[in-house]
Amino acid sequence: MRRVYLDHSATTPVHPRVAAVINRYMLADFGNASSIHEFGKTAQQALRWSRERVAELVGASEADEIVFTSGGTESDNLAIKGAAAARKDRGRHIITSAVEHHAVLHTCEALEEDGFQVTKVGVDEYGRVDPEEVSEAIRDDTVLISIMLANNEVGTIQPVTEIAQAAREREILVHTDAVQAVPQMPVDVEDLGVDLLSLSGHKMYGPKGVGALYIRRGTRLLSQEHGGHHEKGRRAGTENIPGIAGLGEAAATTMEELPQREKHLERLQRRLIEGLLQVEGVHLNGHRRERLPNNVSISAAAIEGESILLGLNAEGIAASSGSACTSGALEPSHVLLAMGMSHEMAHGSLRMTLGRDNSQEDIDHVLEILPPIIDRLREMSPFEIQ
Amino acid sequence: MRRVYLDHSATTPVHPRVAAVINRYMLADFGNASSIHEFGKTAQQALRWSRERVAELVGASEADEIVFTSGGTESDNLAIKGAAAARKDRGRHIITSAVEHHAVLHTCEALEEDGFQVTKVGVDEYGRVDPEEVSEAIRDDTVLISIMLANNEVGTIQPVTEIAQAAREREILVHTDAVQAVPQMPVDVEDLGVDLLSLSGHKMYGPKGVGALYIRRGTRLLSQEHGGHHEKGRRAGTENIPGIAGLGEAAATTMEELPQREKHLERLQRRLIEGLLQVEGVHLNGHRRERLPNNVSISAAAIEGESILLGLNAEGIAASSGSACTSGALEPSHVLLAMGMSHEMAHGSLRMTLGRDNSQEDIDHVLEILPPIIDRLREMSPFEIQ
Amino acid sequence: MYTDKVMDHFMNPRNVGEIDDADGVGQVGNPVCGDVMAMYIKVKDDIITDAKFKTFGCGAAIATSSITTEMVVGKRVDEALKISNREVAEALDGLPSEKMHCSNLAADALKEAIDDYRSRDADEESE
Amino acid sequence: MYTDKVMDHFMNPRNVGEIDDADGVGQVGNPVCGDVMAMYIKVKDDIITDAKFKTFGCGAAIATSSITTEMVVGKRVDEALKISNREVAEALDGLPSEKMHCSNLAADALKEAIDDYRSRDADEESE
Ligand SMILES: Cc1ncc(COP(=O)(O)O)c(C=O)c1O
Ligand SMILES: Cc1ncc(COP(=O)(O)O)c(C=O)c1O
C-alpha cells in the first residue's frame, strides 16, 4: 500500500542530514558542554554553532539572543511566564488571540490565576487578527502581546509586523509563536519587530524535544527552570547537545532549502485545494493568500472529521482533524469556532499538511482516495448537505 | 593517544542499542503520539512501552506513575514546584539537604521567594545526612522533603529509606533525586518509600534532553508546563518519542546489565582508589562504603583542581573537578564545604567517575599519568603539603 | 487505538440506512457534541426484525451504531432494552476510554427507538 | 576554552620557582578564592633581571603567572609597573571572560613585588 504522510504540522520526519549530526553527538562527541575537557569543548562548539545557525534563520543579530528549550511548548511557556514575571510590577495585562496554540492559551490562563488579566482578541472568518483591534485592546498596564505568526490548524498568517509596531511604540513586549511558520516561510525578527519568538525542532525536520526561544537583547525574562547556570541563567538543565546540534542542522537545512521548498509546497497545495474544491460540500478553511504554503484545511459538510481520518488511514494516508475529539473533550477546534464556523462544520474539518518529501503523485493519490470516503460517510450521515 | 573518559557522572555516551532505537523513531516511525493515524499509533506504543520499562526499573507498580520530562533538572523542578503548588494551603515548609544538586537547591530557593521556608540539613564529613536531623526538622507545616539518593560529586548514598519512614508517618511527601543512583545501583520506590523520584537519560547511557519523574499514584502535582493535554495533564509538550523510546531502552539495558555493571565498576573503583591513596597528600572524599560504585572523588593537597584536569586532558584523560571555578563563581563545591573541608582542599578536588566502557587498562593508565601531574603542579605551588 | 472489530464495523458497517415504514425511530446526540445517531427498527410480535442506522460521528460512533443494529435483530423488545453500553463496547472487543460515551449513545438511540415504538403501539391500542 | 598560548604556558611554564635572594617578593590571592600567586624579582640598575613565580590556581592563573615573568625580565621597573592585566591577557592571545581576573592577579603580584623592592630600596637608602 502506498503510504502518504500529510501531517507535517503535527510532526515531521527527521531530515537525514539532521539524523547524521545527532548520531555523531550521541555516540562519538557525547560530552557535557559544562566539562572543561576535550569532550566538553566539542560539545560547547556544537552549542555555539547551533546557536549561530538558529540566530541566522530568524534574523537575530546575536547568537546569544537564542535560548534552547525542550520544544515549542516550553518556548511559549518561558516567553510568556518569563516576561510576565519580569514585568509584573509594571502591569498585569496580556493580549493574545483566540486562535493561539494551547501552549500559549493555557499558559495565559495559568497566569490569570496569578492575578494577570488576559484579553483574547477575535479573528475574522479567515482566521485573521485585526491589528486595529489589538491596538485598541492595549491598556496602561499591558506588558505583553502574544500573537502567533501562522496558525497550526488553518495556516493563516497573522499581521504580526503591524501588531508589533503599535505595541513597541508603547514599550510593550511582543511574542510570536512561529512554530509553524519557521519551516515554511522566511521569518525575520527585525522585519517582524518582535522581542520574543518561539520555534520547535520537530516541526522543521529536526528532532523532537528541542526548541528555541529568540529573546531580543536587553529583554529581561525570569528563568522558569532552576538549577545550573546553563543558557546564561535563562534555562537550567544539561544542554541536549545531540538535539541542539540537530536543531542547528535543521536550521541550516531550512535556510538552504526554503526557496525551493516554498515553491514545491505551493505547487502541491494549489493542486490539492483545486482538486478538493471539486467535491460537493467541501469548503476551504483559512485565508486564501495569507496562508502557509503547506496547509490545506477543509471542512466537509454532514460528516465528522475523525471518521474521514480513519477512512484515510485505512488507505495509508495520514492526515489530521481540527476536532479534538480524540482527547475526550468532544470540543471541536477552538480555532474553527473562533472563525465563526458552525459546530457541525467544525466537526467535519480535515487538515492535510504537506512536506518537502511529498510529491505530485501523493496529491493525485489523495484526490483519488478521499472523495469516495466522503461519499461513503455521507451515505451513513443523518444530515443533508446544505 | 589513548583517550580515557572518566566523567560518566557528567554525562555518558549513548548505548548503541539506545541509539538504534532513537534512529528508528527519528527516521521511520516518526509520528506524533497524539495523531490517530498509523504513525501516531506506533508512537503511542513506543510511549507506553517506555513508560513500562522505566516503571519497572524503579519498581513502580503502574506505568502511569511515570511522567516523561526534558531531563533531571526538569524532573526536580516539577517534583518540587509541582508538589509545593499543590500543597501550599497545607503548609509552606520544605526540608532538603546542603549537598543537593543545584536543580534541587535553586528550585527550593526560588520557592522561598513565593513565601516558602526551606530548612537545609547538613551532612557529616562523609557527606551523609542524619535521618534523625531530618526528623527533628519536621514542622507542622512541612509539606515536602527532598533528599537525593546519591550525591553527584562524592557519590555518597543517603539513608533515604529511614528519612522517608519518619516523613510518611506524618503525611509529608518525599522526593528523591536519583539521577546519579539509577544507573549504578538497584533503585526501588517501594523499598525507599518515596512519593517522587527523578532520573535523567543522559546519566544512564540514554539520550540527553529526556528524563522522568516517578509520581506515586494519588500524589497531586500541579503541572509546570502548560499547553496540550500530554502526560495526563502533568507535562505539556509534544512527546519526544525518539528520546523517550531511547530512555525506555536505556532502562531495559540498565535492568539487564546492572548486576554485571556494579561488579565491574566496584572492581575498577577499588583499584583506582587504592592506587591514588598511594600518592602523598591525596585524600578520598565521601563515604568509604555508602558510595556509588563508579565514583572516585579525591582532594590533592596544595594544588588546584582545574589545573589537574587540564593536565589530564592534555594526556587524553577526561575527568571533572568539584570546583565550580569554570562558572566564574570561584566558589568551591558547596558539597565539599558542607562536608567541612577547607577551601584549599576543596579547590583541589578531582572527580573521576567510571562507566561500563572503562577497563582495567584505563585505570592503570590513569595511575601512571596522574601522579607526575600532581608532582609537577606541586612544584609550582606556594603551599606545602600538610 | 481501535480494535480490529471496531475497524471492521467502521469500514463495513452493517445495516446502514433508514427504514421508511419503521415501527420506531430514535435520534440522539447533537452536532455540537459531534455525534448524532438515528436508529430505525421494525418490530413484529414483540421481536425486532430489522434495524438500521444513520450516524454522524467518529469511528467509534459508527462502529457502535453498526454493532448495536446487529445485536438487536432477533431479540425481544424487552431483551433489547437491557443491552447496556458495556455490552456494546465488549461486543467490539473494547473501546478507548475516551470513546466509551459512544457506546452509551448507541444504547440510548436504541432505547429512544423502542420508546417510540411503544408509544406508537400504545396510541394504536388506545385508538 | 584556552588558547594554544595559554596551554603552552600551562604545560611548559617559564620561570617556576623562588629566588632565594630576591630583591622583591609579592604574594596575592588566598586559598578561599582558589588562587594564590607569589612573584619574586631580582633588580639591577632599575632593570628587572630575573623573575620567578609559584602559583596555586587554575590553568589561567598558572599561564598568566608564567607569561608575566617573561614579560618583565629586561624591563625597567617603572615600565614593568605599567603592564596592565589586558596586556597580560593579550600576550596569551586572550582569556575566557570568566578567567580575566587571573590576569589581574598576575599584574597585582608583580606590583606587590615591585612595591616590596622599592620599600626595601627606600629602607636601604634611609639607613
Ligand atoms: C503553533 C504551535 N505552537 C506550539 C506548539 C508546541 O510545540 P511542541 O510540539 O514542540 O511542544 C505547536 C505544535 O504542537 C504549534 O503548532
Ligand atoms: C544529582 C543530579 N541531579 C540532577 C541533575 C540534573 O539532570 P540533567 O542534567 O538531566 O538536567 C544532575 C546532573 O546534572 C545530577 O547529577
Image (tube, coloured by chain):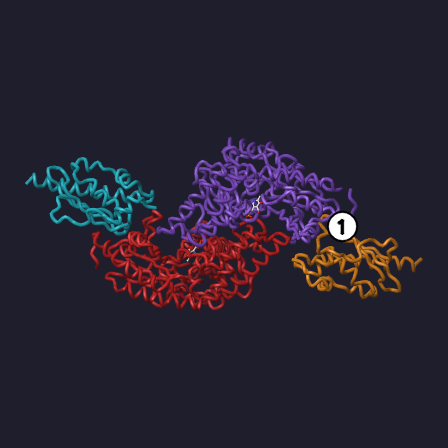
Chain colours: A red, B purple, C cyan, D orange
Q: Residue at x 32, y 57 (%)?
A: A350
| Ligand 2 lies under 8 Å from the Cβ of mark 1 | no
The answer to whether residue A335 shows anywhere in this view is yes
Q: Residue at x 50, y 47 (%)?
A: B18
Label 1 residue SS: helix
Q: Counting other residues with Cα less than 10 Å from the Cα at mark 1, is it few (<14), some (14-19), or many (20 or more)?
A: some
User: Residue A209: x and y, percent?
Assistant: 48, 52
Q: Residue at x 78, y 65 (%)?
A: D82
User: Residue A310: x and y, percent?
Assistant: 30, 51
The answer to whether residue A321 shows anywhere in this view is no
Which residue corresponds to mark 1? Answer: B376
Left or right placement of residue A367 versus residue A172 in this view:
left
- Front position in the image: D24 or B199: B199
A187 in relation to B293, above or below: below
Q: Quadrant of the C terminus of chain A?
A: bottom left
Chain label for disc 1 = B
Q: Residue at x 49, y 43 (%)?
A: B213
Of the residues shown, which amino acid type is indicated by label 1?
Arg
User: Residue A106: x and y, percent?
Assistant: 42, 52
Considering every residue shown, the one lying at the far left of the view is C127
Considering every residue shown, the one lying at the far right of the view is D127
User: Residue D36: x and y, percent?
Assistant: 75, 51
Q: How many marks?
A: 1
Left or right placement of residue A355 versus residue A195 in this view:
left
Q: Quadrant of the N terminus of chain A?
A: bottom left
- Front position in the image: D72 or B342: D72
- Front position in the image: B350 or A367: A367
Q: Quadrant of residue B282?
A: top right
